[in-house]
Image: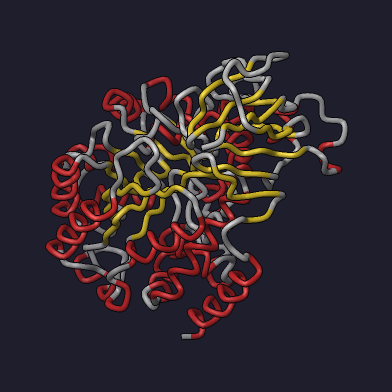
Amino acid sequence: MTTLWIKNPMAIFTANDQDARGGLLISNGKITELVALGQSPKQPYDTFFDASQLVITPGLINSHHHFYQTLTRAWAPVVNAPLFPWLTTLYPVWAKLNPEQLHLATQIALSELLLSGCTFAADHHYLFPQQLTDAIDIQVNAAKEIGLRVMLTRGSMSLGQDAGGLPPQHTVQDIDIILKDSERLVKKYHQRSPDAMVNMALAPCSPFSVTQDIMKESAQLAQNLDVRLHTHLAETIDEENFCLNMFGMRTVDYLESVGWLSDRTWLAHGIHFNADEIRRLGQAKVGICHCPHSNMRLASGICPTMDLLDAGSPIGLGVDGSASGDASNLILETRQAMYLQRLKYGAEKITPELALSWATTGSAQLLGRAQHLGQLQVGFQADLACYALNDVKFSGAHDPIAALLLCGADRAEHVMVKGDWVVKNQSLVNVDVDELQAKHRVVAKALLAA
């Protein structure tokens, strides 16, 4: 076991306002000391890493994604479609996914995230056609090869078109199959230690694709297994109207009716809430994942982040699916969150530091890992991202932390997960990206040609 001093960064965002301008001491996968400006470590160290030309942040945390969608990015038939027609056009394509395609799609998504400075990513996978019933097992193996922490959610669709839902009937599963597989996956893969690399959650897809029964049963199973709950909610007005027509209630009433109004739950999007619904969500500590690029791409609306925060709901960030956000780049997503939220709340309130906190501490809260991820703090996991400001776009920048977002940082120089470098000099340590991309492009074309 060696102890590493990451020495004298140009700037450091700890996400907790502690002085670490002299750097960090890393040992056994954890942060063991924050070094103040002008100081040397109090503890002995074996080696040091010169960070004087780097801006350091906690590893960014992506709290909502659909990895498989890297195969259908920028597909012409849906480029200009809003959510419901976008989905109904893509569902039949996605239903053809095979194991090789999912494995490569997952690795491409994780690689892109890592290169942007992301160290922990949640995926919402809800497609289990007959040829892909072991989808989550495939994702576990794909993630291990990359070296990124993952929260893999066992999604589901149980409300097909025959019963008034949006998905084609051949893409839905029976409730007993869903619950049995959910329990199997949690027991097999969910890790509970502070250094866990794989977490599991239960994630029925959305009000327009699952029955109330699967929502209720998933909530009970999540409580029994002590795991988190995730779903899409209040993304569009179409969804709100669907809930009113199908269930006779608005989205938050629906959420409460199925037993999901709790701090175990985090929601993707969370746009169309009224003041009373925001109050109820905050009171229950329901988390909200803001997905700005996707919300703008599909013209869904703007998440009321500050109102939700003021009410008590934690806010995190997600890149969403790579066919609606199209890019799986979390530092750019953070920049977009800052700019989009400034349109709603003003420049004074939405600072670069606030946006970065959503991508770090906020997302860690959503995923139930706030006690050991999302901050640079003694005892926390050594997950961090280092950004160089040597590109022409940064020339003349004076505030290094603000420059990350204002000047458009889009790629990390180095990334560490659990004390190990997984990105060095903007290159992945554990995978040949060129070879991976070549394979991925082939299967992406095959999927659309099938």
Query: Is residue 13 rendered to the left or right of residue 378?
Result: right
Q: Is residue 304 visible?
A: no
Q: Residue at x 27, y 60 (%)?
A: 156
Decide if residue 183 is on the left or right side of residue 117. left
- Which of the 4 quarters of the picture holds residue 49? top right
- Is residue 160 shown to the viewer in this render? yes
Residue extending farthest bottom: 450
Residue 232 lies left or right of residue 351; in this view the side is left
Q: Position of residue 101 (x, y in %)?
A: 46, 74
- Coordinates of residue 191 in the picture (x, y in percent): 30, 45
Colour scheme of the rendered structure: secondary structure
**Front one among 4 and 252:** 4
In the drawing, does residue 65 fall left or right of residue 343? left
**Vertical placement of residue 80 versus 450, above or below:** above
Front-lying residue, 431 or 204: 431
Where is residue 83 shown, x and y percent of the image?
45, 58
Residue 323 vertical position relative to residue 297 in the rendered view, above or below? below
Rendered residue at 21%/63% (across/down): 158
Image-quadrant location for residue 347:
top right
Residue beneath the point at 64% across and 14% down: 36
Which one is in front, 30 or 313? 30
- Find residue 135 and report its horizontal and vertical position in percent: 33, 66
As displayed, is residue 399 above or below residue 260?
above
Count numbered badges in the picture. Answer: 0
Q: Residue at x 45, y 52 (%)?
A: 65
